[in-house]
Image (cartoon, rainbow, N blue to C red):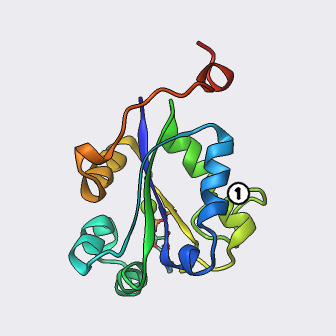
Amino acid sequence: MERTLVLVKPDGVQRGLCGEIIHRLERRGLKLVAMKLMQLDDVTAREHYREHVDRPFFGGLVSFITSGPLVAMVWEADGAVEIVRGTMGTTDPGKAAPGSVRGDLAVNIGRNVVHGSDSVESAEREIRLFFSAEEILTYSRDSDPWIIEP
Ligand code: IDP
Ligand code: MG
């Protein structure tokens, strides 16, 4: 089953939006398989965002993402990466569709409250960076036949 990494970024935690964001992903039908509250160190933050190392916003992004606690989660579904990206909305909240997390809860690209992996390959790399194998649980969900056609 496809998995993706979701972060409620430090702005989302400070603004009390963890429950709201988790609620939206749960209602969508994705399955939560790992979750923890943590504060990123500089090295992990730089590794997580390594594709952006040469961008002008990189320094600000690393200091923001390490500035306070975040909630890291792994969510599972067929097509989890694309489903979460859709529920999150586009990177710039000013352009994000109403109804998406960023389109409903944010106004600024540097404070866009949520992260979701952008490909299956990124998801695998990012999940390994945030979670050990034992922290990712396998369990059955009685509601599955009502969410996924068997
Ligand atoms: P994504 O989070 O939608 O995948 P990316 O392009 O991977 O977007 O950028 C990672 C994060 O870097 C964004 O979520 C945003 O917080 C920040 N970011 C991206 N572009 C800018 C920018 O132009 N100014 C400030 N921050 C930016
Ligand atoms: Mg990205």
Task: Spot the residue most to the top.
Answer: 150
Is 111 above or below relative to 89? below
On the rendered structure, is 132 left or right of 84?
left
For residue 73, which quarter of the picture? bottom left
Q: Give the quarter of the figure containing the C terminus.
A: top right
Q: How many marks?
A: 1
Relative to the observer, which residue lies in front, 118 or 8?
Answer: 8
Residue 51 coordinates in the image, percent (x, y): 31, 65
The amino acid at mark 1 is Ser
Residue 33 coordinates in the image, percent (x, y): 43, 42
Is 122 above or below relative to 51? above
Is 91 above or below relative to 42? above
Q: Check mark 1 vs ligand 1: CB closer than 8 Å? yes or no.
A: no
Relative to the observer, which residue lies in front, 67 or 145?
Answer: 145
On the rendered structure, is 30 left or right of 27?
left
Q: Give the quarter of the figure containing the N terminus.
A: top left
The 10 Å Cα crowd at callout 1, few under 14, some 14 to 19, many 20 or more, is some
Image point (40%, 87%), residue name: 60
Image point (41%, 78%), residue name: 65
Residue 144 coordinates in the image, percent (x, y): 59, 24
Residue assigned mark 1:
100
Residue 116 coordinates in the image, percent (x, y): 48, 56
Disc 1 is placed on an element classified as loop
